């Protein structure tokens, strides 16, 4: 990709000429990554294309500012403007999700979860969360993560037949183990979560309810998924994924927990806030409050539904038989391949995605998301086409109408560029 094309493709790369002069090695990496993202299909469920406005904010002089503490109570001078940026981010997050309090400082989704635990729990406390083999995140009790080392996690799962959350079993485990907190949220559960059912179980055993809504929070912002805020004591989220903001985390809670949550972020688990990211979160929240974003969130779900249906028609086993969200979990086993081999073949054809644990046995499936392709403007027709390209790739019939799958992917992304120049 030429410098001119790349620079016009994204406002954040406006300084790329200067970077190229100073550090051509790194400039090539930036431009190469832009090219990779623009010439292949991004189906990783946790990724999206932020707007040029968000990218510009991330690459702004706000990145230079140190700002430990909170607006009006900083440990550094010169925070007048970044204080305003953080207040705007907080106010917009509160309005968007109907929360009494928002903390927009967590550096990531994992930092947000760590802070939620720090606010509500003590080391050694029992926590009931989705088991990792069923779709729990690392921060939901993995022995390789702080969560598994510092807390006593009990895992719940999904019903073997339906692959849907088994609320009866969640209740049984809660009654047996009497956890201090129950976590609902997953990296791969494609259906809506019944937050009211979780609240009822938590109330019955006197547990806190923590909703880790990292995946669906963007759909919540666009009115395309239920809002956990009225039910959970603390909601943890990421600001990237469907929400289409910068990489980062966020916490939402009621006024009574506000101080504990704030102290759990700073000074307990983090130091200086990253003001460029916080300002970029404010920009993304502003975008997410528009009718265009509501339409986008609903299109993300409509696209995922069609993708799930068409993958089923291609022979994939789609978990839960479909989706309510941006997530589709598809097992390629009926096509004679395991997920790792399938991911490799699809990547070779220009379709980038992840594998994840399947909710039964110890096999893995393909995890796809429609957030990025929907931002590019693709709709149901393109989802059907993508499913067809998956089928051709994995059945080894890559040639079709004289064109390879890779060529068809190239043609598709050329029609729907992530950053139209
Ligand atoms: C449910 C859940 N929680 C937490 C996280 C962690 O987010 P991060 O990668 O920003 O730490 C993720 C990320 O995918 C997630 O899906």
Image: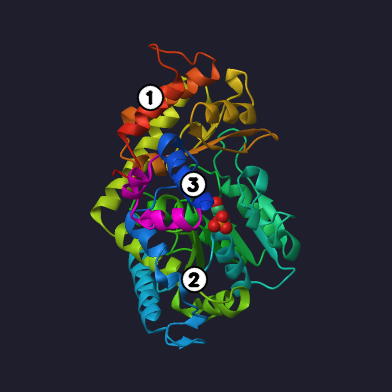
Which element is circle 2 on? Answer: loop
- Which disc number belongs to residue 274? 2
- The span picked out in magenta is 1-23
Kindly report the secondary structure that dominates the magenta region of the rendered protein: helix
- The circle drawn on residue 343 is none
Query: Residue 350 location in percent, x, y?
Result: 48, 30
SS type, badge 3:
helix
x and y percentages locating residue 157 in the rendered image = 63, 45
Q: Give the distance between the C-alpha atoms of the residues marked 1 and 3, in whole angstroms.
A: 32 Å
Let me know if residue 15 is in the magenta part: yes
Image coordinates of residue 281 in percent, x first then y, are 40, 64
Kindly report the distance in space between the C-alpha atoms of the residues bearing marks 1 and 2. Answer: 41 Å
Q: Nearer the viewer, residue 345 or 411?
A: 411
Front position in the image: 67 or 183: 67
Which mark's residue is nearer the viewer, 2 or 3?
3
Indicate left or right for 377 with 409 as reference.
left
Residue 245 versus residue 154: which sits nearer the camera? 245
The quarter of the rendered structure image containing the N terminus is top left
Q: Looking at the image, which is closer to me, 46 or 23?
A: 23
- Asked if disc 2 and disc 3 are in contact, CB closer than 8 Å, the reply is no
Q: Is residue 341 above or below residue 33?
A: above
Tag 1 and tag 2, C-beta contact below 8 Å:
no
Give the numbered dot on residue 385.
Answer: 1
Of helix, strand and loop, which one carries label 1? helix
Nearer to us of marks 1 and 3 is: 3
Q: Which mark is residue 28?
A: 3
In terms of sequence position, does the residue under pointer 1 or pointer 3 come before the other?
Answer: 3
């Amino acid at each position: 990709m030429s410098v001119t094309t790349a620079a016009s493709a994204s406002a954040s790369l406006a300084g790329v000429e200067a970077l190229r002069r100073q550090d051509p090695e790194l400039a090539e990496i930036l431009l190469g990554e832009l090219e990779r993202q623009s010439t292949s299909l991004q189906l990783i469920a946790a990724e999206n294309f932020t707007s040029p406005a968000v990218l510009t904010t991330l690459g702004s002089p706000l990145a230079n500012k140190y700002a430990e503490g909170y607006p009006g109570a900083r440990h550094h001078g010169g925070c007048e403007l970044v204080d305003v940026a953080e207040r705007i981010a907080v106010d917009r997050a509160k309005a968007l999700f109907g929360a009494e309090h928002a903390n927009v400082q967590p550096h990531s989704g994992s930092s947000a979860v760590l802070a939620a635990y720090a606010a509500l729990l003590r080391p050694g406390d029992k926590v009931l969360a989705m088991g990792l083999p069923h779709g729990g995140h690392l921060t939901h009790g993995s022995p390789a993560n702080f969560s598994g080392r510092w807390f006593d996690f009990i895992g719940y799962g999904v019903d073997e037949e339906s692959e849907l959350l088994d609320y009866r079993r969640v209740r049984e485990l809660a009654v047996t183990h009497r956890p201090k907190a129950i976590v609902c949220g997953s990296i791969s559960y494609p259906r809506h979560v019944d937050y009211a059912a979780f609240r009822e179980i938590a109330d019955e055993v006197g547990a806190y309810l923590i909703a880790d809504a990292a995946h669906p929070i963007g759909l919540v912002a666009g009115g395309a998924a239920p809002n956990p805020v009225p039910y959970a004591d603390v909601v943890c989220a990421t600001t990237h994924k469907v929400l289409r903001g910068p990489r980062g985390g966020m916490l939402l809670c009621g006024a009574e927990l506000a101080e504990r949550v704030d102290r759990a972020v700073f000074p307990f688990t983090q130091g200086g806030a990253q003001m460029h990211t916080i300002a970029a979160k404010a920009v993304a929240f502003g975008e997410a409050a528009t009718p265009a974003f509501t339409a986008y969130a609903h299109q993300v779900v409509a696209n995922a539904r069609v993708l799930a249906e068409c993958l089923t028609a291609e022979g994939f086993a789609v978990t839960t038989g479909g989706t309510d969200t941006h997530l589709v979990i598809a097992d390629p086993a009926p096509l004679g391949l395991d997920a790792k081999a399938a991911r490799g073949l699809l990547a070779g054809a220009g379709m980038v995605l992840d594998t994840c644990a399947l909710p039964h046995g110890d096999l893995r499936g393909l995890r796809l998301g429609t957030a990025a392709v929907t931002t590019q403007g693709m709709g149901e027709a393109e989802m059907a086409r993508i499913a067809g390209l998956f089928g051709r790739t994995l059945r080894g019939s890559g040639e079709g109408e004289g064109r390879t799958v890779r060529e068809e992917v190239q043609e598709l992304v050329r029609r729907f560029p992530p950053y139209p120049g």
